[in-house]
Image (spheres, rainbow, N blue to C red):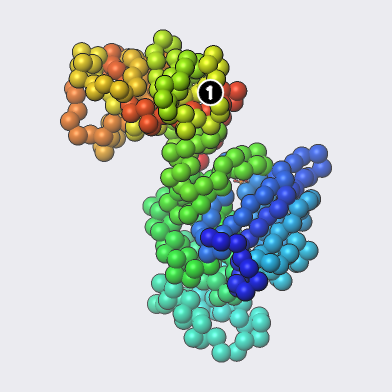
Amino acid sequence: MTNTTKTQPGGDVRLAGISKTYGSFTAVHPLDLTIPQGSFFALLGASGCGKTTTLRMIAGLEEPSGGTVHLGDQDVTALPPYKRPVNTVFQSYALFPHLDIFENVAFGLRRRGIKSVKKQVEEMLDLVQLGEQARKKPHQLSGGQQQRVAVARALINHPKVLLLDEPLGALDLKLRRQMQLELKRIQTEVGITFVHVTHDQEEAMTMADRVAVMNAGRVEQLGAPADLYENPQTTFVANFLGTSNLIQAEVDSRSGDDVVVRAAGDKLLLPASRCAVPAQAGGKVLVGVRPEKVGLTHADEAGSIPEGRNRITGRIGNSSFIGVSTQYVVDCAACPDFEVYAQNIDRDARLVPGADVVLHWNPAHTFGLDAAQDIDAGVAEGEAA
Ligand SMILES: Nc1ncnc2c1ncn2[C@@H]1O[C@H](COP(=O)(O)OP(=O)(O)OP(=O)(O)O)[C@@H](O)[C@H]1O
Ligand SMILES: [Mg+2]
């Protein structure tokens, strides 16, 4: 997405050095962020990391301690919420209980004194697939239907940006999954910018084109979901987004495009281009690999593992069969709880707790992180989410 020019309507949301402090506590550190026009953008992070505060500063509901908010060319920092071309949908979507669905959606138009609302309201109800429910009261709808009414009620004002703060938080898991797809469809159809706050990494990855991973009032990393997953730059992102096996290693030497590292006597290859820090011989680095990238072979069959793969030895500590895959926890000298997710294709019956195994993977799937960080950053938060 290119930067906006004066001729374009709407435009990107640009936060420049925006921050929020409460007394001596900093909820949001000075933050620069551009949210491209028309994108589905997610702010993802654990509870208390500053997501809602950031969203409320975009909406004008919270006054920033510093910095500016631009919408396209317009500096909206000093504008009150109702003068910004922005609408918010909250977790508690607070529909008007005494009004029917039609009138709930019509509310924004009526407030602006618009008399003939029928066509627009019907279009909106069709968009969220509630045309049949127009004359029901909110309490006669399911949670997911009520959520869609809240979205329709916000969209009827034709905001340039729709802000959504944990809009699916009150729904059960199955309904959440449905609504994630539904919101994504609506966003694609209307084409306006959605900024979606969530602490659920799967939700952010399913819905968003771009995700900003927040931690303690800062954006740790920003990118497309697959890019964040495959190329985490910090231990927090590696652990918060899915699961990573992180191994403490020492840089040995350089071999072509790869860095050779040593971990508990094993020699591993790491593409230099996938190392987030410069790798100097003798220096420390954290070597990471995702659980689904790793093969698990019984030690007796080690000879069958193709040449050129990274390999470490260990003993299976735990295995859980979950249908499509089996998840193993393997105790290795280099990494005490190495996780491996193996698809259930041909299961080797010998792969049970206590078995000696070799773990092996394509070196291209290895990433390298700064060893000065907390190796467990984001682990608990990721699980809680
Ligand atoms: N009015 C306030 N006064 C003091 N501290 C506040 C205030 N509002 C928020 N905070 C603090 O700022 C931090 C960020 O809050 P925020 O609501 O943005 O978190 P969040 O990422 O949305 O979390 P959650 O996922 O739980 O909603 C928290 O530590 C919170 O306690
Ligand atoms: Mg919040």
Q: How packed is label 1: few (under 14 Cα within 10 Å), some, or many (20 or more)?
A: many
Residue 79 falls left or right of residue 59: right
Q: Nearer the viewer, residue 217 or 127?
A: 217
Q: Nearer the viewer, residue 25 or 283?
A: 283
Residue 63 falls left or right of residue 209: right
Residue 354 falls left or right of residue 290: left
Q: Tag 1's secondary structure?
A: loop
| Amino acid type assigned to the residue bearing label 1 in the image | Ala
Coordinates of residue 133 in the picture (x, y in percent):
43, 75
Q: Which of 368 and 27 is in front in this view?
A: 368
Q: How many labels does the image show?
A: 1
Residue beneath label 1, please? 279
Coordinates of residue 336 in the picture (x, y in percent):
43, 17
At 26% from the left and 38% from the top, the residue drawn is 324
At 43% from the left and 57% from the top, the residue drawn is 180
Coordinates of residue 327 in the picture (x, y in percent):
32, 29
Q: From this view, report whether residue 371 is shown above or below residue 32.
A: above
At 78% from the left and 45% from the top, the residue drawn is 22
Task: Tell which residue pokes out farthest to the right in this image.
Answer: 23
Q: Nearer the viewer, residue 228 or 326?
A: 228
Coordinates of residue 356 in the picture (x, y in percent):
28, 13
Q: Can residue 224 be seen in this view?
A: yes
Q: From this view, report whether residue 105 is shown above or below residue 356.
A: below
Quadrant for residue 72, please give it.
bottom right
Q: Can residue 89 be seen in this view?
A: no
